Amino acid sequence: MDPVLAGWIDALERESGLHVPLAAREWYSVREAVEWLARHGDNILVSAARLGNPIDGLDYLAGGWLVTETDSRARRWS
């Protein structure tokens, strides 16, 4: 577990008021887990540092959605 990555998730929760599900918190707190998955799949993944940021100008977080990836058909997953 990377304390810096876990800190980003803590800050995201404080700033947004949303709760990041435990599985997402664990995955995003493991150093290079997102990069590993990106190398082994076709989806575009959101890095831990960019979690909660607007995507293509849309603020999903304001609507209560935490986007973690975009699949090969341009669908957002949260």
Image: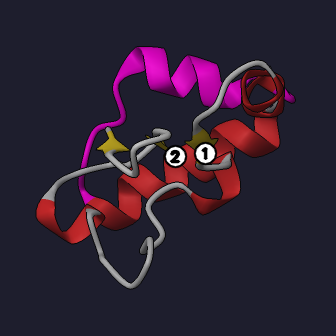
Q: Position of residue 47 (x, y in %)?
A: 67, 49
| SS under mark 1 | strand
Q: Quadrant of residue 73?
A: top left
Quadrant hosting residue 29:
top right
Q: Which x, y percent locates residue 23?
A: 45, 14
Cα distance, mark 1 to mark 2? 23 Å
Q: Amino acid at mark 2?
A: Asp
Which of the 4 quarters of the picture holds residue 44? Answer: top right
Q: Residues within 10 Å of mark 1 (few under 14, many from 20)?
A: some
Tell me the residue at 83%/27% (across/down): 39
Name the residue furthest bottom: 57
| Residue 60 is covered by the magenta coloring | no
Residue linked to disc 2 = 10
Apparent side of residue 11 relative to residue 37 in the rendered image (left or right): left
Quarter containing the C terminus = top left
Asked whether the residues under the numbered discs 1 and 2 touch, taking CB atoms below 8 Å apart as contact, a structural biologist would say no
Which residue is the site of mark 1?
44
Name the N-terminal-most of marks 1 and 2: 2
Depth order, front residue of 39/34: 39
The range drawn in magenta is 17-32
Query: From this viewpoint, which residue is outermost toward the front?
Result: 73
SS at circle 2: helix
